[in-house]
Image (tube, rainbow, N blue to C red):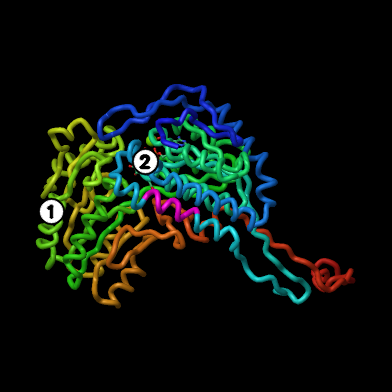
Amino acid sequence: MKFDRLETSNHIGGIPGVGDGPELEVVDPSTGRTVWTYRADTPEAVRAAVDAAAEAFPAWASATPAERSTVLHRLAAELETVAEDLAQAETAQAGKPIRLSRGFDVPGSIDNVWFFAGAARNLEGKAAGEYSAEHTSMIRREPIGVVGSVAPWNYPLQMAMWKILPAVAAGNTIVLKPAENTPLTTLMLAHACERAGVPAGVVNVVNGTGPVVGEALVTSPKIGMTSFTGSTAVGRHIAGLAAANGTRTHLELGGKAPFVVFDDADLDAAVRGAVAGALINTGQDCTAATRAYVHRDLFDDFVSGVAELMRSVRLGAPADPATDMGPLVSFRQRDRVAAMVDRAVSAGARAVTGGGAPGGELAAGAYYEPTLIVGADQRSEIVQEEVFGPVLAVLPFDTDDEAFRLADDVPFGLAASAWTRDVYRAQRAARSLSAGTVWINDHIPIISEMPHGGMKASGYGKDMSTYSFDEYTRIKHVMSDITGLAAKPWHSVVHQNA
Ligand code: NAP
Ligand code: MG
């Protein structure tokens, strides 16, 4: 189904519907034109969605892993048939270059479905056994119930998948709210779930703004868990709301990934890696390379290499396969990025390349030039805060210890990379850097089998991989007496004559 033929804006209990709330718009940020309008949901609709998910839970939770796996295999196959429509919709609503949507967002999302279709049959735990001589212990890994999830706009389909798949593979049901500006591919996914025979109520989608629809969802006393991806500020706010109900949370928040280039690094690889790692998705990637720490001996060559490559990046229409980098997701986000760069420059830093919005035809869209900053202070905003735009700051260092210290000297801890040809140094970097992912001689790649998630202000809990099942399941210990004795040996601690 193509997005402009979508006539419904929510999916509750297997029924596609429309909201009763205020009208909202999906804007193509490359032109500023509205590509789709819809009516937001109300808190009543959120309650109906949670009820539908709760009603669907018992049957879905007691389906066999093989049954759940079969449904997810059908979903993956169904999504393969609409992959191009999904790519077009993702590009229209988020301004992503079509090469990125076709080559990364959509195939990565579908691979996640294939992965969780298999993983659904591989929920693991400790072996049953006699840990006490008188008992057999065993572990039951059970779904939690209804998951209430809130997703961001940077990778709308992938983020929806990361929330939905481990939850439903493990036997939970879910209500998901996408970001208000990027609902299209999540709605298309809900339709695909229906065609694939996902039982009604297992996957529900509601739409609207965070403070209204998002809060109605995460404060529902009927949800067993909230999983959230987005900003650190909203994540902490949601964790506070969840605490009032004692609801479990999983938070995937912002990042400020360091990119550490040692003096023995392959300079060409580091330069190419920095440009790709900083500019992917116009820098709106929580793992994007944002701070390069470069050994002083390589500093000037690194800066000139990155600047030259950044200048060759082609900005253009997202739908054009020749476009390397599209606009920011919105004019608001573009203005936020521009203001942060302007403040950095006022504070004494220098933009070696970029540092502004392009003119000409691109001025109609939310574009910003690839920007390389030098001379920023480690304590400054541009080095400490998440920019979420195509901006890389480069700082020099002299010793390994200094590099590790500077790399960790921010609140965030989502991802990091180290560039070196020395295996010992690579292992020291892997150990030293406080981040949920550490790349060696690369930056950005992810894979369904491996976990993604943060440390420190980047949140906690894992997406993807079988590690995600630890978030979406609860562990029950079942301990059975195997002696058959009425007077059990341990009774003596309570009752002398036992
Ligand atoms: P955000 O405000 O944290 O939004 C993320 C999601 O939370 C959206 O669906 C949003 O709804 C919802 N939300 C907002 N306030 C809420 C509330 N009070 N209760 C429940 N849900 C609420 O993030 P953003 O404005 O989209 O992006 C800003 C920053 O988030 C970025 O600069 C970046 O730092 C971070 N971010 C991180 C990631 C990541 O993968 N870690 C991804 C995207 C963004 P609305 O649609 O109404 O905003
Ligand atoms: Mg927001």
Q: Nearer the viewer, mark 1 or mark 2?
A: 2
What residue sits right under mark 2 in the picture?
A: 90
Q: Magenta region: which residues?
A: 105-113
| Of pointers 1 and 2, the one earlier in the residue sequence | 2
> Residue 86 placed where, x, y %?
40, 42
Main secondary-structure element of the magenta-colored stretch: helix
Secondary structure of the residue carrying tag 2 is helix
Q: Nearer the viewer, residue 348 or 46?
A: 46
Q: Is residue 460 left or right of residue 396?
A: right
Q: Of residues 322 and 423, which is closer to you in this image?
A: 322
**Can you name the residue that lies furthest to the front here?**
81
Q: Give me the disc on residue 307.
A: 1
Is residue 365 located in the magenta-colored stretch of the structure? no
Residue at 45% x, 52% y: name it: 110
Q: Amino acid at mark 1?
A: Ala
Q: Quadrant of residue 470?
A: bottom right
Q: Position of residue 182 (x, y in %)?
A: 39, 36
Residue at (41% x, 36% y) in the render:
2
